[in-house]
Amino acid sequence: MANATKPAVKPANPCFSSGPTAKRPGWAIENLDLTVLGRSHRSALGKERLQLAIDMTREVLGVPDDFRIGIVPASDTGAVEMAMWSLLGPKPVMIAAWESFGSGWVTDATKQLPLEDVTVLNGEYGQLPDFSAYDGSQDLVFTQNGTTAGVRIPNADFIPADREGLTFNDATSAAFAQEIEWDKMDVVTYSWQKVMGGEAAHGMLILSPRAVKRLESYNPPWPMPKIFRLKKGDKINEGIFKGATINTPSMLAVEDYIDTLTWGKSVGGYKGLIARADANAQVLWDWVTKTPWIKNLAENEAERTNTGVCLVFNDDRIKDAAAFSKSFVALLAAEDVAYDFGSYRDAPAGLRIWAGSAVEKSNLEALLPWLDWAFETLIAEQ
């Protein structure tokens, strides 16, 4: 077989990783306000910038006025585990897991926290579990978007409006790219390095009034590390939700997050950001439809994510999908066409291409001929 013709045009930005993700279009460090660097995060200026990050989050995400928004340590993982350690226990717990990170929350609940009544809703990679088992009497922990499986929850209809339990939504790869139904949510978490392309290490913890009521009325029986403590005495520590972070934040990362939010407002706010991700994902879905050697890991079209699109190979000539995927990713990285877009280590072997809001549609369009070229090149070498 003759060698495939190498495409002439490369993506202007080859960053297609699912986290940290590509920086927003036009990003440059010169755009950041660096006045606060070298200053204490507890100075008047430091508190002002942290509060601005919280206020802009509320504006862009449309967070209800009576929900509290806090900046917390350890990225989305820290935010989820702070909520689990602080709030779980009074009611039976149901955890939905159909990909790697949801499975991690199962481990926390069943092996780390001494919870006695835990039900796990399992789904295979590419499929959602059966949420009809949730009747609202339990606390529910779930991921809105399966970062490692390319599957998202299409809506929150399965959550009763009159639920008794709290809902915990790990929305790290959904926030800013998918609708969040705030009336069905009690805890929402995410990290800066996902959809908005911010820098890592910090998480966002958003609590409904129902979650705050639970926090103030319940004292967990297990030890609480300092970075998990959300209360002062029997009341919520309001300072955490006004920019007084538990530990020292990177003010450079804070400024970068403010920059991403400013850009988000400039492209139409939340609706504009969702539209960008939808259009980006459609580029990939259309290509998959006409490409016989690849298919979407998500089996149900309504459940396919518009952020981390997960694809698996669909060609009998590929005998070792893991090795083929590794070679595929390495080949395009060597060409400086696409970086870090292999499937997650626990997921079925294939490709995971980030299509979130900060990615330019033109870069995905430029990537497609290279995907075809890489496949033809590697198949010819077998």
Image: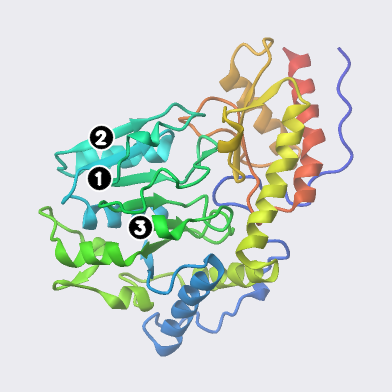
Residue 23, visible in the rendered structure: no
Q: CA distance from mark 1 to mark 2?
A: 9 Å
Is residue 97 shown left or right of residue 266?
left
Circles 3, 1 touching at the beta carbon (< 8 Å)? no
Q: CA distance from mark 3 to mark 1?
A: 14 Å
Is residue 7 shown left or right of residue 353?
right
Q: Which residue is mark 1?
A: 138
Among the two numbered marks 3 and 2 on one chain, the one whose residue lies closer to the N terminus: 2
Tag 3: amino acid: Val
Q: Which residue is mark 3?
A: 187
- Of discs 3 and 1, which sits in the foreground? 1
Q: Residue at x 46, y 87 (%)?
A: 45
Q: CA distance from mark 3 to mark 2?
A: 19 Å
- Of discs 1 and 2, which sits in the foreground? 1
Is residue 360 shown left or right of residue 1?
left
84 vs 346: above or below: below
Among the two numbered marks 1 and 2 on one chain, the one whose residue lies closer to the N terminus: 2
Crowding at dot 2, Cα within 10 Å, few <14 / some 14-19 / many 20+, comes out as some
Tag 2: amino acid: Thr
Residue 335 occupies quadrant: top right
Crowding at dot 3, Cα within 10 Å, few <14 / some 14-19 / many 20+, comes out as many
Tag 1: amino acid: Gln
Q: Residue at x 37, y 35 (%)?
A: 132
Picture coordinates of residue 284, whole percent (x, y):
72, 38
Picture coordinates of residue 145, whole percent (x, y):
50, 44
352 vs 178: above or below: above
Secondary structure of the residue carrying tag 1 is loop
Q: Which residue is mark 2?
A: 119
Circles 1, 2 touching at the beta carbon (< 8 Å)? yes
